[in-house]
Amino acid sequence: MDRSQRKMDHIQHALSTNDLQRNGFDDVRFIPNSLPNIHYGNTLLVTDLGPFRLTSPIFINAMTGGAAATTEINQKLAIIAKERGLAMAVGSQMAALRDPTARESYTIVRKENPHGILFANIGAEATVEQAQAAVEMIEANALQIHLNVMQELLMPEGDRDFSGYLEKIQRIKNKLSVPVLVKEVGFGMSADTIQKLVVDIGIQMIDVGGRGGTNFAKVENLRRSQPLPMFDDWGLSTVESLLEASILANRHLSVMATGGVRHGLDVAKALSLGAEAVGIAGALLRLVKTRTIDECLQAVDAWHHEIRIAMTSLGIANTDRFRGLPLVIMGQTADYARLRGIDLVGLAQR
């Protein structure tokens, strides 16, 4: 199967499996503030992700590219990013690096959003030269390197050799002139993985990319003649991954959270758990495939409104203040955290 058909399969199955039902964010509760002493109109959505000052904590995360039909999707996403001042990443550019006819499905993003913050995207198997070419292709401000081991193992035509990935990431990080962010694609990150990236090779931005949104294990199982459904629930949730990342909170590390974000309150919870920015992919893919641009913009406005409602009701004017608020973690997430030795009492009483 060629890559363009694979890209279309991924979109079709992502839409059919991504129903955004209950997930780990439902185990997280804020402590209400009945005397917030603040005006809704004074709340600011500005946040910093590594060296980037973002006007919104919402980040349009990597989705697609590499097929003719994906050009329109990326074009619409780029328009949304431009109109609402959102940073944006494209999907894996390996297809365009191997087939120049696929380039337009990525370059359209910079054409539509000439002054926006854009992240290029490649896999950890890439060479330094491929990483640089991906950045140059869309004049990117930064590069995402994605990790997707389970997806590759379930993908009929996927990779089977993951040797030397950490060293490859380090070479790219050391050679590129733009910042590098390492992201998971929906299976979450453990403290051990984060430590290897941050402590061992000096990565300063990660996206924990947890379970709860688009499930690429299910997507690939739908493409297999003999599915392996026992791996459909593989990985850590986004909330579990953020708790894992908190173990390294004293390090110079910027965290992005993606996976299962359904609305502005989920964004607020992710920010309170330590994220600087929150990626949305599946929910936006569904919007651009089924709604007009104006309706998509209205949805983004609604998410921003929901974040500001949370800020006002909690008595904070700036998004970085979320990280000082007490949070109560319950349910399966609490069970997981206790077994991992994560201090939930301290989180609830901070």
Image (cartoon, rainbow, N blue to C red):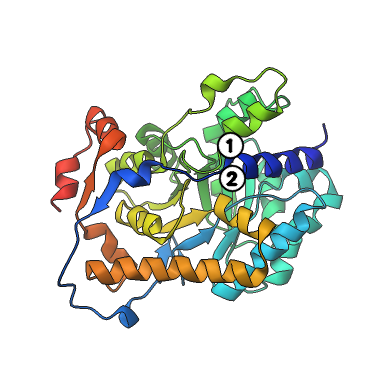
Q: Which residue is mark 1?
A: 168
Residue density around tag 2, few if under 14, some if 14–19, many if 20 or more, within 10 Å: many
Q: Nearer the viewer, residue 303 or 158?
A: 303
Badge 2 vs badge 1, beta-carbon distance below 8 Å: yes
Q: Is residue 275 above or below residue 52?
A: above
Q: Nearer the viewer, residue 38 or 287?
A: 287
Residue at screen point 51% across, 60% down: 59
Residue 52 can be seen in this image: no
Instruction: Determine whether the residue tagged by mark 1 lies in a helix, strand or loop.
Output: helix
Residue at screen point 26% across, 51% down: 29
Q: Quadrant of the N terminus?
A: top right
Amino acid tagged 2: Ile
Can you tell which mark lies on residue 304? none
Q: CA distance from mark 2 to mark 1?
A: 6 Å
Relative side of 62 to 344, left or right: right
Residue at screen point 62% across, 54% down: 285
Q: Which residue is mark 2?
A: 172
| Percent position of residue 134, x then y | 69, 52
Q: Give the residue at the far top of this rendering.
A: 226
Q: Nearer the viewer, residue 318 or 39?
A: 39
Instruction: Determine whether the residue tagged by mark 2 lies in a helix, strand or loop.
Output: helix
